[in-house]
Image (cartoon, rainbow, N blue to C red):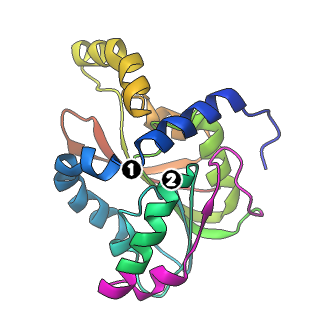
Amino acid sequence: MTTALIDERATALTRARYQRLSTIYDLVEGLAETRYRPWREKLWKLVSGPRVLEVGVGTGKNMLFWPKGIRMTAIDLTPGMLEFAHRRAVEAARVAAPYALTADIRLGDAQALEFPDASFDTAVATFVFCSVPDPIRGLRELKRVVRPGGQVLLLEHMRAASPMLGALMDTVNPLVVRMMGANVNRRTVENVRASGLTVESVEDLGMGGIFKLIAAQAG
């Protein structure tokens, strides 16, 4: 586990924001999810097992895409989100992913993962590192718990490359964070590289380069 101190205040604030939003989170994101759903499916088709960690499982939107024949562990920072994730695991088991019911779904902090080194073959996060208080620390934790040569797959939104749009995102970011918990101006590709992960590919999914699928490898 990383030895540097976690900013407990920032972490508690993030948890409180998402706890507050947990009961309406899926409703608020309903329209956006029509765009995100194909991207989620695309990402999960890249996943290699058998041991897979999902960081920031949220309300469990990815569960229907979990590949067959894997041992899933999923964590989230927020108890309220996990309540919905557990319910969705039961529903996913009925519909398309029977192993979702037996997945290990628990509270956890991306900045301090409670797993030994090299515990997983793949780690996945979708729209998570916009809200982790210390994203580089969190990404280093993914690098630690994934075996050497294993995958780290991220679906993220980030600061636009356009100077004008990027400046606008910087301006509105404090308000968005207070309302929704997520930063809209993170430079996530740069953060992945700074964490020591090896970036293998970055796919632009649209919206002026704001949405990207990042494939990286743990060294």
Quarter of the image holding residue 52? bottom right
On screen, 87 above or below 166? below
User: Within 10 angstroms of label 2, few (less than 14), some, or many (20 or more) residues?
Assistant: some
Under mark 1, the amino acid is Thr
On screen, 70 above or below 16? below
State the image coordinates of residue 162 (x, y, percent, origin top left): 24, 20
**Rendered residue at 61%/64% (across/down):** 106
**Rendered residue at 67%/49% (across/down):** 141
State the image coordinates of residue 158 (x, y, percent, origin top left): 36, 33
Describe the element under mark 2 as helix, strand or loop.
helix
CB under 8 Å between discs 2 and 1 = yes
Mark 2 — residue?
80
On screen, 207 above or below 141? above
Describe the element under mark 1 as helix, strand or loop.
loop
Residue 124 visible in the displayed image: no
Instruction: Specify the segment rendered in magenta.
Output: 92-116
- Kindly report the distance in space between the C-alpha atoms of the residues bearing marks 2 and 1: 7 Å
User: Within 10 angstroms of label 1, few (less than 14), some, or many (20 or more) residues?
Assistant: some
Find out whether residue 64 is within the magenta segment.
no
Q: Which residue lies furthest to the right in this view?
A: 3
On screen, 216 above or below 94? above
Horizontal side of 178 relative to 114 (left or right) equals: left
**Among the two numbered marks 2 and 1 on one chain, the one whose residue lies closer to the N terminus:** 1
Mark 1 — residue?
23
**Rendered residue at 63%/35% (across/down):** 11
Under mark 2, the amino acid is Gly
Q: Which of 21 and 51 is in front in this view?
A: 21
**Rendered residue at 34%/27% (across/down):** 159
